[in-house]
């Protein structure tokens, strides 16, 4: 064999060796992350949960207001003699209620319509004629009129949680009769309107006082506040609990509905699911002052879900290590063997260390080595799984190996690899929603109070990578109220 040929053969062997050295990397060294990649981003954790709001509708029955008005408003609203109507003219006025008082809910207020009749007798003298000694003749005229008094009752709550009412009375005449006084026609409204307003306003104050006694708002709110510090079991297994910790009280709108006026008080607080042993129930605090309603109304049940890296790697050991993926690359069959695979935290993403070997078509050697990938954790609550999306090579992975193995993340290969990086959550959120709905649909918490709630939508609030695993805060949202149960002695329920 001549010397030039041997030199060419040695050169080819050296080039092959260099290429193999660039692509075959420490196959036998233990699989593990690079030190610079390990660990979650400092401060990573679950953000503060969103507060829930639970409605506490206080119903003021329209029939109750009508009964109070019938009792407290006198039948005779005004009876006065010698009321000055105009110069030289006086009137005797007798005004009384007729028929029943009508009460209705409208525009967030209670409206009272009081039917009234009036009997008025006006008296005056004819003017004395100059030069004559006789006095002027006395004249009288009597009239009868029907009209209504409309009153509006505003409802509110003071800073001490007492019901506050403010009644405004206005006179609305069906017809404003003209009382003929000599040559003048005097409207009945101007003749007696101010006296009626004064008398009626005084009577309406007694209605305000009676309503306050019949609607013990502060006592009802205090009872609801104390009863809201609850920890209740979800289901019958005894290892899943719903815990509510109130943080504030607020007042919503006044809403007329179905013959009642509802004063919507709201309790705000944190509502969460706890698995395991029964959590300690929070101690009820004194009744707080008023606060603003939460930004998002309704019930928000916090359900943290997680996948630990230990559990994820056990799952990968069973389903992936030693597995051979039969693939098609450049129109040729390729066998890719996963020799080892592991996930671990890398900042706010999840890193994947993959040790593999593959027999590539058209190559004199197998491609083997370890690469580092990173992916973004996403939570699918419908399937109760965590996935890694947006897989990419980590920038610190050996560049030569990345160039040679770029095909791993394209086409069918990337999809097959991503399908292996799917992990079961430790909790099925839908299951908790079903348990909560079954428990909270009609849950009596006191002799006079029932909790009613319904949860429907599920939302992933945030996902965080920690040193232990990936944790996601999910929320099941819906509506809830503390409904007051009719009992003897509570006329407002």
Image (tube, grey):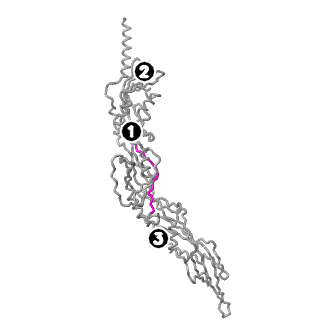
In the picture of the structure, the residue carrying the numbered disc 3 is 210
Answer above or below: position of 152 versus 185.
above
Coordinates of residue 126 in the picture (x, y in percent)? 66, 87
What range is drawn magenta here?
Answer: 470-486
What is the spatial separation of the Cα atoms under label 1 and label 3, in whole angstroms?
62 Å
Q: Residue at x 39, y 39 (%)?
A: 348
Coordinates of residue 104 in the picture (x, y in percent)? 55, 65
In the picture of the structure, the residue carrying the numbered disc 2 is 360
Q: Nearer the viewer, mark 3 or mark 2?
A: 3
User: Considering only order in the chain, which callout, 3 or 1, is on the residue closer to the N terminus?
Assistant: 3
Q: Is residue 295 visible?
A: no
Q: Secondary structure at mark 2?
A: loop
Occupied quadrant, residue 228: bottom left
Name the magenta segment's main secondary structure. strand
Answer above or below: position of 247 versus 33.
below
In the picture of the structure, the residue carrying the numbered disc 1 is 348
Q: Residues within 10 Å of mark 2 (few under 14, many from 20)?
A: some
């Amino acid at each position: 064999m001549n010397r030039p040929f041997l030199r060419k053969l040695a050169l080819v062997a050296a080039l092959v060796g260099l290429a193999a050295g660039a692509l075959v990397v420490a196959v036998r060294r233990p699989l593990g992350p690079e030190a610079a990649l390990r660990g979650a981003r400092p401060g990573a954790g679950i953000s503060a949960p969103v507060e829930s709001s639970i409605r506490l509708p206080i119903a003021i029955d329209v029939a109750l207001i009508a009964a109070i008005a019938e009792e407290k408003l006198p039948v005779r609203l005004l009876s006065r003699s010698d009321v000055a109507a105009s110069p030289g003219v006086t009137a005797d006025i007798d005004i009384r209620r007729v028929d029943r008082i009508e009460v209705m809910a409208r525009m967030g207020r209670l409206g009272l319509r009081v039917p009234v009749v009036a009997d008025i007798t006006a008296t005056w003298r004819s003017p004395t004629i100059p030069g004559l000694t006789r006095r002027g003749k006395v004249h009288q005229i009597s009239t009868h009129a029907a009209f209504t008094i409309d009153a509006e009752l505003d409802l509110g709550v003071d800073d001490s949680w007492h019901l506050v009412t403010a009644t405004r009375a206005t006179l609305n005449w069906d017809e404003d009769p003209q009382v003929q006084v000599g040559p003048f026609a005097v409207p009945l409204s101007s003749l007696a309107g101010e006296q009626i307003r004064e008398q009626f306003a005084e009577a309406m104050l007694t209605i305000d006082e009676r309503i306050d006694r019949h609607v013990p708002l502060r006592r009802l709110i205090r009872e609801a506040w104390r009863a809201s510090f609850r920890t209740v079991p979800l289901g019958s297994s005894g290892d899943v609990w719903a815990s509510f910790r109130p943080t504030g009280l607020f007042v919503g709108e006044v809403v007329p509905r179905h013959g009642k006026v509802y004063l919507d008080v709201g309790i705000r607080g944190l509502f969460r699911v706890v698995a395991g042993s029964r959590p300690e129930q929070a101690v009820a605090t004194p009744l707080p002052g008023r606060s603003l309603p939460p930004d998002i109304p309704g019930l928000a049940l916090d359900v943290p879900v997680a996948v630990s890296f230990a559990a994820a790697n056990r799952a990968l050991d069973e389903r992936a290590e030693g597995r051979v993926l039969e693939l098609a690359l450049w129109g040729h069959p390729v066998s890719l063997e996963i020799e080892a695979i592991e996930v671990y935290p890398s900042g706010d993403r999840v890193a994947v260390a993959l040790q593999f070997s593959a027999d590539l078509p058209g190559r004199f050697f197998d491609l083997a080595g370890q690469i580092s990938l990173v992916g973004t954790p996403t939570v699918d609550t419908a399937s109760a799984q965590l996935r890694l999306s947006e897989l990419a090579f980590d920038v610190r992975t050996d560049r030569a190996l990345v160039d040679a193995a770029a095909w791993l993340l394209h086409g069918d290969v990337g999809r097959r690899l991503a399908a292996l990086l799917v992990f079961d959550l430790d909790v099925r959120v839908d299951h908790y929603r079903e348990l909560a709905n079954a428990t909270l649909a009609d849950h009596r918490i006191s002799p006079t109070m029932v909790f009613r709630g319904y949860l429907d939508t599920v939302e992933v609030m945030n996902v965080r990578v920690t040193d232990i695993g990936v944790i996601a805060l999910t929320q099941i949202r819906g509506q809830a109220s503390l409904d007051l149960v009719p009992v003897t002695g509570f006329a407002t329920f």
